[in-house]
Image: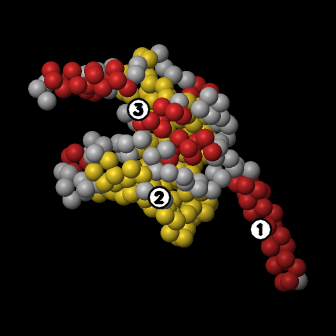
Amino acid sequence: MKKTSFLGLAVALLAFCMPQIQAQEAQLPFTGNIQYKITYQSDVLPAEHLAQMPVSASIKMSADKMVFEQADGNKAIVDASTGEIHTLANLSMMGLGKYHIVQNVADVAADTAEVSAQALTATGQSKDIHGYKAFEYTSSITSDQGNVEMTLWCVPGFCSPVFNWATQVAIGQLNGFPLEYSLKTAAYTMTVSVSKMSYGEVDAKHFEIHKSYKPSTKEEMSKDIEEMMKAFGM
C-alpha cells in the first residue's frame, strides 16, 4: 500500500513538472519581457551621484524585434527584418529634445572601429538564471574614456542571432544572450541582472517610434550638445 502511494505521488510530481520543462524549452528563441535591476558600487563617486543613475531597464522581444528601454525614456529598437538599430535619445533633461537616429550594420561597425575589443574569454563557470543555464565570459574594452572590464553571463540559443549581434558589436562574438552582466570602470562597477521574466506575445506598439522623437543624425545631435555646453560655459 505504501509503495503504491509513493509511486502515485512520484507520477503526479512528474506530470506536474514535465509541462513546465517543455514550456521552457518551447521559449527558445525567447519572446516576452525581461525586467532588469541595475546596481552600482563605487569608492570614488558620491552616493548622491549614483542615485541619479538608472536603476532599472527592460527588454521586450517579439519574433523579429527587440526593444531595450530605460526608465528615463532612452530606447534602442532592433529590427531583425531590416537589420537596423533605432536609437531614441531623450535629452530633455539637458534642455534639448528627443532624437531618433537610425543605423544599419555598416553604421554600427563604423561606430565601433575605434574601440579596441579584446577577445572574449570563456571561464568555464556557469550558474542558473531564472531556470536557464548561463555561462560566464570576460572581456576588456579600451577606449578614449578608459578601460572597461566586462563580465557576462550568457544563455546559448536564447534568442534570434540578430539580437546577439546588436548587443555585442563592440565586444566580439558572444555565444549567447546576456541575462546578467557587469561593467567595471575606474569610477564604478555597474551590474545589470534579471529581476523578472514573463513569456508571451509582445504588443507591436512597444516597437513603435513615438512622434515626439524627431529624425536626426549623430552629428546633428552632437552639435546640439556642444552648443548647449558652450552656452553654459562648459
Marks 3 and 2: which is nearer the front? Answer: 2
The residue wearing badge 1 is 13
Percent across and percent down for residue 213 are: 43, 19
User: Dot 3: what SS?
Assistant: loop
Could you tell me which residue is drawn at 50 percent across and 51 percent down?
172
Q: Is residue 139 above or below residue 160?
A: below
What kind of residue is marked 1?
Leu
Mark number, residue 74: 3
Query: Can residue 214 be seen?
Result: yes
Horizontal arrangement in the rendering, residue 137 relative to residue 46 (left or right): right
Q: Disc 2 to disc 1, how far (Cα)? A: 45 Å
**N-terminal label among 1 and 3:** 1
Horizontal arrangement in the rendering, residue 20 relative to residue 189 (left or right): right
Q: Nearer the viewer, residue 89 or 101?
A: 101
What kind of residue is marked 2?
Ala
The residue wearing badge 2 is 119
Mark 1: few/some/many CA within 10 Å (<14, 14-19, 20+): few
Percent across and percent down for residue 218 are: 38, 26
Mark number, residue 83: none
Percent across and percent down for residue 117 are: 42, 52
Q: Nearer the viewer, residue 215 or 17?
A: 215
Q: Disc 3 to disc 2, how far (Cα)? A: 29 Å
Horizontal arrangement in the rendering, residue 87 relative to residue 63 (left or right): left
Marks 1 and 3: which is nearer the front? Answer: 3
Which quadrant holds the N terminus? bottom right
Q: Is residue 133 above or below residue 26?
A: below
User: Dot 2: what SS?
Assistant: loop
Q: Residue furthest bottom?
A: 2
Mark 2: few/some/many CA within 10 Å (<14, 14-19, 20+): some
